[in-house]
Amino acid sequence: MIGTRMMEENHNNPDMKSSIVQSMESSLSVLRVQRDTVNDPSMQAEWAKKRLVWVPHEKEGFVVGSVIEDRQNDIEVEILDTGKRVTLSKDDCQKMNPPKYDKVEDMADLTCLNEASVLHNLKERYFSGLIYTYSGLFCVVVNPYKRLPIYTDNLIEAYKGQKRNVMPPHIFAIADTAYRSMLSEHEDQSILCTGESGAGKTENTKKVIQYLAYVAGTGRQAKVSNNSKGELEQQLLQANPILEAFGNSKTVKNDNSSRFGKFIRINFDTAGLISGGNIEFYLLEKSRTCRQAADERSFHVFYQLLKGAPAEMKDNLLLMKCDDYRFLNNGYISLPNVDDSAEFNNTVKSMEIMGFHKNEIESIFKIVSTVLMFGNIEFTQEKKSDQALIVDDSVAQKVCHLLGISFQDFSRALLKPKIKVGREFVHKAQNKEQAEFSVEAISKAFYERMFKWLVSRINKSLDRTRRQGASFIGILDIAGFEIFHLNSFEQLCINYTNEKLQQLFNNTMFVLEQEEYQREGIDWKFIDFGLDLQPTIDLIERSMGVLALLDEECLFPKATDKSFVHKLIHNQERHPKFLVPEMKAKSDFAVIHYAGRVDYSSDQWLMKNMDPLNENLVSLIQSSNDTFVVNIWKDAEFAGLGATEINETAFGARSRKGMFRTVSQVYKEQLAKLMTTLKNTVPHFVRCIIPNHEKKPGKIAPLLVLEQLRCNGVLEGIRICRQGFPNRILFQEFRHRYEILTPNVIPKGFMDGKEAVRKMVEALDMDKNIYRIGQSKVFFRAGVLAQLEEDRDIKLTELIISFQAIARAHIAKKRYLLRIQQANAIRIIQRNGLSWMKLRHWQWWRLYTKVKPLLQVTNAEAEISAKNEELKIVQDKLDKIIFENKEAISKQAQLLADKQQLQIQLQQESEEKAEMEDINERIKARVSELQSVCDDLSNRLEEEDQKMHEYSLERKRLEELVHDLEEQLEKEEHLRQKLQLDKNNVDQKCSKIEEQLAELSDTHEKLVKEKKLLEEKCHDAENRFADEEDKSKKHLSLSHKLQIRINELEQDLAREHESRVELEKIKRRLENELSENKELIEEKVSKLEELNAQLVKRDEQISKLLSKADEDSGLLSNLQKQIRDYELQIEELKDDFETEKEGRLKAERNRRDIAEELESLKTEFMEATDKSTISQELQKKKDKELQYLQGQLESQEKQFKSKHDEIKIQHQQQIDLLRDQLDQVSRLRSQIEKAKLALESENSSLSEEISSLQQHKTESEKRRKQLEVSYNELQGRYSDLEGSRNTIQIELQKLQNELELISKQKEDDDQSVSVLERKIANLESQLHETNEILHEETKTKLAAQSKLRQLNDELVLCNEKIEEFEQVKLQNERELNNLRQQLVESKRKAEEVSLQQLEDFKKKAQRDLENTQKAVLDAESARDRSEKSKKKIQLELEDANIELENTRALLREIEKKQRKFDQQINEEKSNYQNVIAERDSFAQEVREKETRIMNLTQDIDKLHNDLAESERVKKMLQIELDDLISSKDDYGKNVHELEKAKRALEAELLNYKNQVEELDDALQSSEDNCLRLEVNLQALKAEYDRNHANKENEAEEKRKNLQKTIRDMEEELENERRSKLAATNQRKKLESQLSEMELQLEGSTKLKDDYNKQIKKLQQMLRDAQQDMEESRQSREAMNNTLKDCERKLRTLENDHFALTEQYNAVLTQKRNLEAEIVELEENQGKLGNFSPEEKRRLETKISQLEFELEDEQANADLAQEKLRKAQMQLEQMTSDLSMERNLCQTLETDKQTLEKTNRELKTKIAEMETQAQTRSRAQVANLEAKIAFLEEQLAAETGERSSLSRTIRRLEKKLNESNLQLEDEKRISEQAKEEAERVSLRHRQMRRQMDELEEELSREKAKSRNLQREIDDISEANDTLKRDNAQLRSSAVNRRHVGLHSGLRPVSGSRNGLASKTNSSSDNLPGNDDAESVGTDGTY
């Protein structure tokens, strides 16, 4: 109401409103995370650089470590805080989230979900003052141990009506969510606060009540009067102080610890206002009233009353000081910041607000004082007797005064209570311990009943019947899982409650999600999370469970805690959640709870469960004159103290009024009611965490928090949340935000949102597993939207970058074109200006300017014709390019098709390989299952023998004592009810079996399941038989007491002779009941017969189905027939067992009838004592009937014994036969596994050979021969298997003949079993050690043999030399003698060397043996680590199942991207080929133009020569003319002729000049065109090189990332698959031997068929491979280099084959040696003692199994070694390729240097030529410059190509390094596999898979390297051609240079040439200009 007034004032005052908003913002800022500090790029970079992980730590839980080195199974990590480096297993480390996930508000958003990440997030938030954190659908709270300003009314206003994801995590958000859900959905809500003591449960409960009282009470002002305004809300808030005073206390962990659980129910009306409340409490710790632990207090109310009560009240209540009370054994302990006197006043005030009357308050405190006073009553014991005495009567009188009872009665009831013995009551003396126990029990009961009354009184005050409650919100405050070193009855109840709550959590956590899915109408099936806790709950609460057996033991007077434990272990020993501790353990039994294993100690469990009280004291208290005391004790149900005493009197008999209810029964009822209530509500979970036990703020004990997280199931809750679809988004928003990722998918115009989303999702190629489309939203798995956001950011970045690039390119191009135009214009102006300045005074120029316009028409026609010719040439080239492009496209399509076919083949092979692996795993699982079945059979046999022996003894006792069981009516009635329940269960199970049998004809898998169920029911029947035997034992234990009671009854019968008429009536009634019972028995017998008939029919159906299965397998038909026979025998035994059980039930019914009759007789005798005659007659009849029944019982017992003996003999025979068959099948299975391994190895070799066979014919043919040889070997092995099977059958027949002898020797063998087992164990260990030593010795022996072979070879060479010397000896006898001496010396030295080497080998063998022993120890430690990691894998199994689908989807996306990437690569390659073709065409065109230019220059040279000649002639003629002019007179007559000749010569000269000018213009234009083409070509080539390099780099990076991701995912998938298989194999339980044998036979049949199919597939694959080989041979005959490589590989394979044959021979020799040693061991065994045939057979089977395992492991090691050799060969090949590439790079580098050198020389020469060539012709200089530019372009091209080549080489080196690393990893993996091959078969499969993957990747890399090699070869060829062209150009340039230097020119032409050189030299560094041509030719500016 205060908050309401504040809000009204805020609305009226703007300043106040703004201040409130500011305060709300400041409060919220405390709860928000500062994202700028978390999203630090430097932290992100450091995280990515250092590869940070979480490393386990002893104190800190987990610390940050940086991965230094990543090995196969281990990693080396450097601890960042200490710098220490440690090496540990990968399973021990946990992944670390990126820094951006620090302080995340919802831990379900974490990418790496593990304990370390959750702990780190909680710690970071806790240190920042953020105590609330969401964890999926619930909230985690960490106790801050300090006051935080986060519970104000302003914050309540801020959270009111807000969504959860808008506001920070808070308890107010949870309360508001529950409140709003209640109003909107009209469903009851509940908030469950759980956690340890001191975690903050009570405080958070109070905050929830505060929030609800504030929110739901503000609208009440107008509806309620001013006097009652807020009364109910105030009372609701004030109920907590009362409960805390009477129910809370100080503990070591918490100063205000609630010592009880409570469920507060707040009712609301239809308007959402509070209409009432109710409180229920559970498990009050009443023992705290009597004693407390050190540094702890009792309940607060004791100290508040003693400190805060006024003096008058203290006098009335007879109060003393705290130290005076014995029950307050720690005295007064004050609490920090707490005043007990003030708290007392607050408690009283709260009671007054709640409406307590004064007399009620006084009565409550009077009870409190009484409880304290009880503790001060002291007792002493008399010296001569056990009678207890009260030391000080005054204390007892005070107690009696406070209770209003008599002191004499109180002392009598306490010291000498009255008990009933027979029909009389006597007083029994109590000793000191019994009296003290009575006082403590009554004091605890007083306080508990007072607390119960207090809670009911509060509920009465909170009840508002005038308001109709529409719905309610329940707040549960209860302790969480408690796991101490030793746990008692209280911990069991608490953990039982938490099991039920966790089961509720698991069942309802997903309801909110499912409701959303149902509303949206998506395709959704309920997911089984594998978190069913029902087995643990059934273990505790069901019949024959912990609590039921505890209640049952409480009924027996002689029962003890040990007898309870014994019975519990006997009944629940095989329960999967029940464990029996070791002998040294202090605990009695253990239960596997959800939070982990909990060890329980059964000390005083019976006492705690009965909670006995003194009946005399209770009756005295109930007669008190104090009405309050009488009210709290009325209707009290309790157990008497005598119920716990062990005596044979009637003191402990319970009251006849009714059965008392134990503590467990009451609690079960309360809990059941609570769970019913919670199941009808929508739960909200709050997990409270205690950070430390020191109660210090800002400190976290990591190990403590981790333990609580495990107990509270935080990780599992997050996993459950993540398995759904937590991310969802509206259709319109999804389309608006992510349409950029799917361009052109949604057409323009209107489209339905759902259809648009569907199109977008299909375009994104999402897996249907990761999304669902509803009616208005689209749902995604966790992390999918984040991935879409990243894709969207990448897409936007690419678009912006491309836009920027286009814009920048456009701007740069415009600037470039402008500058080019300006430069061209400047050059034109400069050249024309200079030319005009030099030519303006030249007469010929003037003549040229006048004649040029006249020649314009002819020049234009010539230009047009030249252009047309050029156009035709270009058109032809264009057609050629188009044709080549089409051919390239067709080739590309063909290559793509071939690639798809290869991918399909690869996929098929991978699927077949996966099938083979699955078959192998199933076979190994069956081996383990059969082994467990064998063990179970042996154990059951021993148990059955023991049980039968015990039963025979008990049967004899029952025959003697059957008449003593007449008075056990109540016990037998109880047993009858249990048997009836068992029978009903059997009937229900039989009906279920019948329903399941109807479905057996559908599929074979249903048949297997039904057979398992049948065997399970058989096992249950056997268990019930054992239970019946145990119960019969109990009957015997009660026989003595029953005998006494029967004697008493017989005495009563002698006195009671007056009940004649009544007995006659009773007789008739009994006869009627007897007839009815007989009819019931007959009905039951008929039902049992029907059931037996149904079982027979069912067996017939099963036999039919088995016969059908037998038709499929011809090899094992004999075994199947025998198994069916045994099955029929077992069913007959079952029928016999049922008949015997029926007889037993019949006898028990007769016995029960007799007991009922006798009981009725006993009751009626007391009323009819005057009818003795009739009673005597009835007694005689009764005796006759009893004798008749005894005779029947004896006959039935004899029949049962005989049948039981027969069953035992048959059962023993069947077990022996089944054992023999099991051994036979195990041997067959091991042989089949061996054949399978051989097939797998051959399959792998076939796959490798197929890939290599496609390269060349020769290699494929040889591989085919090898396959044929291997196939023949497999056929030989198969025939060997057939022979071995026949021999095994013969041995089986022999063993069956020996069966009778074995049965006779069984009794003698039973005594020596233990001795033989120990000897067998020793022999096995010795055999194992001998095998290891033998293995090492064989290795050394093989090495020595190889050395000996080398020595023999050397001796052979020496012999050859001797022969040569013997031939020489004929010529020289001296040399012969010398040679003989040398021969003798060489032999001696060789022998010495061989002996020395043998010694060295022996020493080395010893060292190897020691190393092997060390390796064995390492393997054992690795096995321990694997067991440790196995648990962790099981915990992470569900995460793996969730991420499996995501990983698969990601893999599909990666494959799709890979295909797109390959397509882009192919396109780029085609573009590259096109560009190369264009470049070649351009080069051809340039060469043609160069030839044309050369021709033109030659023509020009000729013209210049002619011109020079004409000039010379002209000069001569001019001289002659001058001479003629001088001699005019003499030659006047010839003047006219000379002038005429002169004019002709001038005209001819003019023509020559015109021709020269035309040729110059044509040359200039061709040079310009050439330069322009070269510039364009260079630009195109540079752009292509740049783009190609960028794309190659990007592609390489993407490919590496994808490959790395694929490898990581494949490893994770493999680990998850292995863990999943291991988990499923562990969950499989084999309940019977028969079903497993049938399954194994059927599996063997299927396995044989699968093998046949696989052989056929391999043959078909071989034929297909041959066809592919033929095609590849035809298509690749021209590849000589590949042929050489293949031949070299063939030689290596032949060498490998030779080595393998040698190894095979060595293995054969080793096998023979092993067989010899086994024979020796068997002889030694014969010497050690005369073993029984059965033990010999077991030893033989074990030896054969060891031989098979040795052969298998040797084969696995050989395979691993072979793969390692192949990998090393590939490494050598790649290193040789790398060396070749490096050599090529060096040659190219030297060529580059030479070219650069020649370029520099040419440049210097050109500079010299430019300074010295002023007189040379313009055409020659231009030609030389063009050639130089062309050479420069070629040089640039070569440098670009060289740079690309160097980049390619670097990529190759990088790939080679990666391959080397992978090969090293592979080598290390293979070595580890070889070391662990003898023990860990699972690791072999893993290593083989990884090796196969690495080999495939290496083959891919090798193919890529071959492609790159071919590209490099092409580039080198192109380089060679360019070098040749360069040499030709260089030679032509040199020739021209010499020609130009030696040619002489005229002055005029020289001046013109000099002018041209200057004009051209000014523009030599620029590209050709078209404008220059146009302007220059026109002569304009």
Image (cartoon, rainbow, N blue to C red):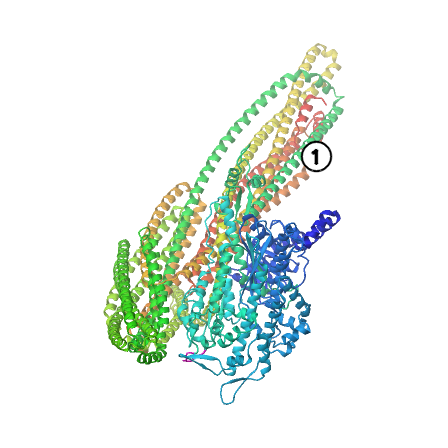
Magenta stretch encompasses residue 646: yes
User: How crowded is the residue under tag 1: few (<14 C-alpha within 10 Å), some, or many (20+)?
Assistant: some
For the residue pair 101 and 710, the one nearer the viewer reads as 710
For the residue pair 1416 and 1199, the one nearer the viewer reads as 1199
Tell me if residue 606 comes above or below residue 1476 in the rendering. below
Q: Which residues are magenta?
A: 645-650
- Residue kind at label 1, given as amino acid type: Glu
For the residue pair 1978 and 429, the one nearer the viewer reads as 429
x and y percentages locating residue 956 in the rendered image: 29, 77
- Residue 1787 seen in render: no
According to the picture, the residue beneath numbered tag 1 turns out to be 1810
Asked if residue 1343 lies left or right of residue 1494, the reply is: left
Magenta stretch encompasses residue 1514: no
Q: Quadrant of residue 1631?
A: bottom left
x and y percentages locating residue 824 in the rendered image: 70, 29
**Please, what secondary structure does the residue beneath circle 1 have?**
helix
Quadrant location of the C terminus in the rendered image = top right
